[in-house]
Image (tube, helix red, strand yellow):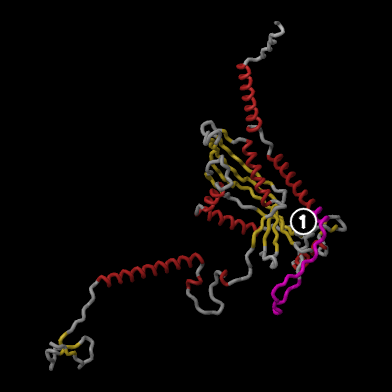
Amino acid sequence: MATDMCPMKPEPALSFTQGLIVGQISVVLLIAAFIKFFIFGDPPSPEVTATIRAAERRSRTLAHRQSLLTLRSTTPSRPPQQPTLNKKKSSILRSPPTLTIGSILDKTYYNVDSHQPESLDWFNVLIAQTIAQFRSDAQQDDAILDSLTKALNGSSRPDFLDEIKVTELTLGEDFPIFSNCRIIPVDEDGLSLNTGRGSATGEKRFDANSTRAKREGSRLQARMDVDLSDMITLALETKILLNYPRRLTAILPVALAVSVVRFSGTLSVSFIPSNRSQSTPTMMTFSFLDDYRLDFSVRSLVGSRSRLQDVPKIAQLVESRLHRWFDERAVEPRFQEIALPSLWPRKKNTRGGDEPLDGSSISPSSSMGKGKGREVAKDVQEEARREVEAEAAAGQRREMSPPEALRYRRVRGRGSSIGEFSMPGSLPGMGLDVPT
């Protein structure tokens, strides 16, 4: 009888209510720890962050360079390209000898090993005028604002974000300063050709007679330092939509303002000649070296009633995303290409000038400036329009007035008869017999 009885189960140490309370407290503590250390945690200093990012970019550049050198050592040298069948060239136009980067440097008296870097003060003035005109044009219409709004609300916008609105746009007041420009010979992959060794100092020198310098694709690259300290601001405002478990379960307003405070780095510019066999035009390429410094100022505001201001983690995420966007587009080994138009002088591109070269007389309006010429043309068009309107009004009045009938008058004179009439303007002695 005793063996048929089930053994008593031990009762739990905590009741259901106590376990529920402990679980809720644990969740609250985890959430509090996440908010304190992950969202409101103190971010690292800008110097530490910049050093870490520079080290990552440098390691990526070295890895890419090492992969290029390994690929060159394992890949056999390419045979010289066979000349393509082109149209027969004219014998009148003499073809110049093939230019290499060494011959270009010799004819321009530029020694890449001893030439002093240039200051580029004249270039800074031209760039400043261009940027000032761009800022002035942006104030006249909303083209840049419409372009930004379309780009932010394009197909790449995630579903959990509402429409993004631009609330502030500041294009800055200062201008970039370019300095320390120097010419560096590079090969087709952008690697420096300074491989020779100097006899005294042991530093790398350029050898114009080396195989790499004469290889197709070698070019001269201009490198210059860029420094900009300004406040270029873009402020946005949107809403985070929570669509689970049903659509628009919760809405969280978010306001964000990102400002570019400083940029400093090294810009490299080079030209790639056109290739008639591949129908490619002349290209200008530019990129930044991996030693650049880009500082942002990020302000954020989350919530509608209880607002969280300047969350550090949001600033870190935004800065990381912007640095990645810039690295993927314009930092070596990546670069940007711009196709250049033909620089040969053409008549349709000619502007200005006081008198024609043949000495013929011209109207005074042709020697005016561009702005004055526009005003004169506008006045002439307005005067022509008024004349056309006056002629049209006179024509309408003539159409509304009744037509004048032909008038006959009897010639009262000596020897005139009753049935003899004359037409106005007829010759003397010529009568008109009208039967009565």
Q: x, y percentage for residue 192?
A: 78, 57
- Is 21 or 288 nearer to us in this picture? 21
Quarter holding the C terminus is bottom left
Residue 319 visible from this viewpoint = yes
Question: Is residue 213 within the magenta segment?
Answer: no
Residue 268 location, quadrant: bottom right
Residue 250 visible from this viewpoint = no
The residue singled out by tag 1 in the image is 191
Q: Is residue 283 above or below residue 307?
A: below
Q: x, y percentage for residue 50?
A: 70, 42
Question: Is residue 73 within the magenta segment?
Answer: yes
Q: Is residue 173 above or below residue 251?
A: below
Q: x, y percentage for residue 379?
A: 42, 67
- Is 1 or 227 nearer to us in this picture? 1
Report the magenta residues as a range. Answer: 68-97
Quarter holding the N terminus is top right
- Is 382 or 236 nearer to us in this picture? 236
Q: How many marks?
A: 1
Q: Residue at x 55, y 71 (%)?
A: 353
Tag 1: residue type?
Answer: Leu
Q: Is residue 359 left or right of residue 285?
A: left
Q: Residue at x 69, y 58 (%)?
A: 269
- Is 277 or 374 nearer to us in this picture? 277
Residue 17 location, quadrant: top right
Q: Residue at x 53, y 75 (%)?
A: 355
